[in-house]
Amino acid sequence: MDTLKRKHLIEETLKTFGSVPLKEAATAVFECLGYRSQKQLDLEPKTGAGFISTFAQDRPFNREQAMVDDWQSVDFLFQLTDAEIQTSGQGQLPHPAHLLLVSSRKGTSSPPTFSPSC
């Protein structure tokens, strides 16, 4: 796909925010950028507490820095490994795997926050 077509596809995909579920819209944006992974999980509950109990229960995690108390909801999009990044032609990651999350914040109409983490 040429650059102009890719930019148009990304622009059209970004317009879907607000009209489709947040997780679906965010995943579509990453797919437009060439990031795909089958390592997906439906996080329950979709809260900061649900995230912590699933991913950070017994691991170092800075709740304040992550602003967990401001999360209205959080979705686990997928995990990308270094091998998946290399396969997509995007280079290498500094760490062997990253979790991609998207969250909406309480009491704000701010756009969603994408959080790559390792």
Image (tube, grey):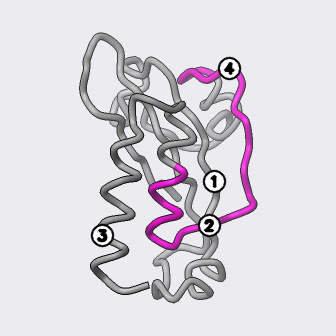
Q: Residue at x 68, y 20 (%)?
A: 45
Q: Are marks 1 and 4 in contact (CB under 8 Å)?
A: no
Q: CA–CA distance between discs 3 and 4?
A: 35 Å
Q: Amino acid at mark 3?
A: Lys
Q: CA–CA distance between discs 1 and 2?
A: 8 Å
Q: Are marks 1 and 2 in contact (CB under 8 Å)?
A: yes
Query: Which numbered mark, 1 or 2, is in the foreground of this view?
Result: 2
For marks 2 and 4 on the same chain, the one whose residue lies earlier in the sequence:
2
For residue 78, which numbered disc appears in the image?
A: 1
Query: Which numbered mark, 3 or 2, is in the foreground of this view?
Result: 3
Q: Are marks 3 and 4 in contact (CB under 8 Å)?
A: no
Q: Are marks 2 and 4 in contact (CB under 8 Å)?
A: no
Q: CA–CA distance between discs 2 and 4?
A: 24 Å
For marks 3 and 4 on the same chain, the one whose residue lies earlier in the sequence:
3
Disc 3 secondary structure class: helix
Q: Is residue 18 left or right of residue 86?
A: left
